Image (tube, grey):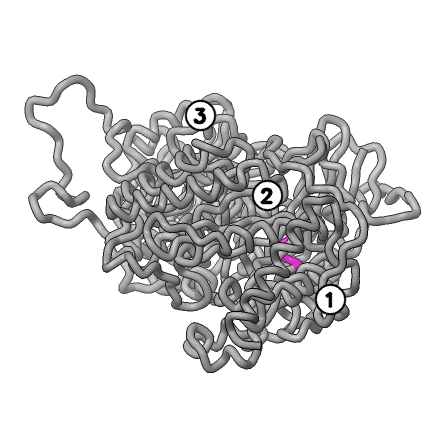
Amino acid sequence: MNCISRRLAEWLCCAACVAAFYRGDSLAQSSSSEVASQPIATTSAQPRLPAVKLSGNYFEHNGKQFIPVGVNWVPAKAAMQWPYQWDPTAIEADFAQMHQLGVNTVRVDLVWSWFEPRPGDFNPEAFQQLSFLSALANRYKIYLNPMLLTGGEVGEAYWDVPYRNGRDPQSDPYMLELETDFASELSSRFAKDSAIFAWDLTDEPPYWISANASDAAAINWTRLISSAIRRNDSLHPLVVGTSMQDLEHGPFRPDNIEKEVDFFSIHPYTIYKPKLYPDAMLSERQTYGAAFQTALSGGAGRPVMLSEVGSTSSQYAPEAIAKYERTTFYSALGAGTNGFLLWCYTDAAPSQYGKVPYSRSPNETQFGIVTWDRVERPAAKMLTAFSKMADSLDLEGIEPAPAEAAILVPDEWSKPYGDASHFGLTGPEIAPYTSQDEGGAVIGQPLPSNPTDDDARLVGAWLSSYILARRTGLKPAFPREFADWQSYPMLVLPSPLTSEQSWLIHLHSDFWSKARSYVENGGALYASLSADAAIPEMEGLFGARLVDHMPVQQVTLKVVAPFGNLKPGETFTYSASSGAFDQWAATLEVNGGEVIAVDQDGRPALVAHQLGKGKTLLCAYPIESYLANLPSAFEGKDRTDRIYQSLQEWAGVKRTVWTDQISVEAAALNAADHGYIVLVNHSAELKHVTLSSSLPIKALRRAAASDGHDLGRQSSGWQIDVQAYDAEVLSWK
């Protein structure tokens, strides 16, 4: 068959399948292996998928909340060339297998240049192919999550349009016009297609070809594309498929796009962030990655979906990948993540290894949960089990339990560049304030680049505090500096939030008077310091003041007074870099506070203070940063979490659910009189767990149990075994 005849046959097959579906006929009902070798059959009517909307934290269809579980789809043999190497039989075989694996949502790249090969000239074949995918989605009950303007995808590739001509796709006026027109065209054609789960505006912006991506460009781009869709389509939720923008202070970070989208996306590829995660893939810190990003992004005010995560069998054992992904999923579930998509469905076929992008990105060749010839890997079995569990949950009225601890996000970090609403200035200015640090004040002066080192310092401390709080049984949240953080029982402020070196990563000077009121009214406040600490009028808040700073290398904190669970004589040890100013000690003079621990030279290291109805605990060392810089920090015997727990106990901060094993986290998803408790073992060993809770639990059972047997409660709590890198979901009433 010649090329023209082959394309005509493929086209007729595609058109016939779509037409058959919309007549009420079905697509193939064969197994995936049979489908791969047989034409698509049409026999009986198939219902269409119900439309999806957000209902609280979770998605809803047919009046019932559900959790999207699935994969990103790039075909094995055709890879990103699948639209123009069209093989409807192979595509249906993929959908058939994904259905068998429990997939209910699939994320799909739409290559813009295929839909619009020339400006304003739309390709009818591309739209017909998307209709074919929609028909498959209905047949196999798998929602589509299309990415409209796929640029970067698979390794270092950027899938360009031939008419860009060097223009920036996220700031150039002509490119913005074309992109909004395309988004409008696509959304108008599929505005009522209920098989589409949500529109993902693009994958992992800013594009690498957008060399000068700025906050303003990201906000404008998102606003324009979302408005173009909303002009025609009010049915489908909107999201931008961001990757690490929340960790890197990127222009597409959640705070910048919150007004334009319905939910946030995270891609917590911890294996590719070795400075933030200096650990093995199977480690406590890495398996907390998705939950951490859910909490951090969610603090900007939208629900969070995990749109990509995974690991490659070209670098890691498939069995280890399944354990990593399982622990990551369940930890994120407990944190409130509302959807779970792995990268990706299949490996690339060996025929792709000699072609870009795979020839340049060997790691990308084997991310699949199935091999290129559809053999299931352990991750596929994990996904099937997770999908079955998620489908069994009755989420009516369920929301993630409120957090007990707040880890603050500075306004200067979260706000868009140039926002002066919290500068404290009013009325017209005779001599306008101009910052020498922000850039752009002089003609030709560039806007500031992202201060990578400062951001890494902040995010590393945030992550350490997050894990320490979880080990303590506290659920942390990340409210923004000008949000309602006063409603949380406990406030955690690791250095550099208390510093002065970079305005991006510390709190405003007037924050501390608000903190004092918070404590006086019953709040519990923890703060750590370093050599660059600066806190106005801190003596009244903490019962101690700054005197000087001191370079250190080996740090020992020795408890000298009983405090919560801490006993005199106990020690905590850390390593610091004497050449790094931000790791030096802050030296304190105590006036009104109580010294709980001293350092290796006998100086005050932990100081407790009572103020009004509340309590504070001050640490003279940036211990969270020490842990952030320490490889495998949470795999050894470190118990810094007990410092957090001592304040929690002394201040009487009430926890919702907790365990007696620091590596087994407990999280609650609750309604008024029922809910679920998620236990996650982040360690390599079976853990015999005692679960405790302040919830009004009358009956507790395994959610997946078919015998209806209640777990018996002992005087100390409920006894449960949790396997290594595994989880238990418990139902309570």
Left or right? Give the position of 171 relative to 553. left
Question: SS class of the residue under badge 1?
Answer: helix
Q: Nearer the viewer, residue 156 or 386?
A: 156
Q: Earlier in the sequence, mark 3 or mark 2?
A: 2
Image location of residue 109, percent across then percent down: 50, 56
Amino acid type assigned to the residue bearing label 3 in the image: Tyr
Q: Nearer the viewer, residue 557 or 698?
A: 698
Q: Taken as a whole, is the magenta stretch helix, strand or loop?
A: helix
Task: Please report the residue visible at 72 percent of the width from the left and 52 percent of the height from the top.
Answer: 140
Give the class, few, some or many, for how many residues have Cα within 10 Å of label 1's Cα (few <14, many ≥20).
Answer: many
Task: Say which mark, if any, is on residue 35.
Answer: 1
Quadrant containing the N terminus in the rendered view: bottom right
- Residue picked out by circle 2: 197
- Residue 480: image quadrant is top left
User: Is residue 656 in the magenta section?
Assistant: no
Marks 3/2: CA distance?
43 Å
Task: Please report the residue visible at 41 percent of the width from the left and 77 percent of the height from the top.
Answer: 360
Q: Which residues are magenta?
A: 326-330
Q: Earlier in the sequence, mark 2 or mark 1?
A: 1
- Residue 599 at least partly seen: no
Q: Nearer the viewer, residue 341 or 468?
A: 341
- Residue picked out by circle 3: 518
Task: Please report the residue visible at 35 percent of the width from the left and 49 percent of the height from the top.
Answer: 250
Quadrant containing the C terminus in the rendered view: top right
Image location of residue 152, percent across then percent down: 40, 60
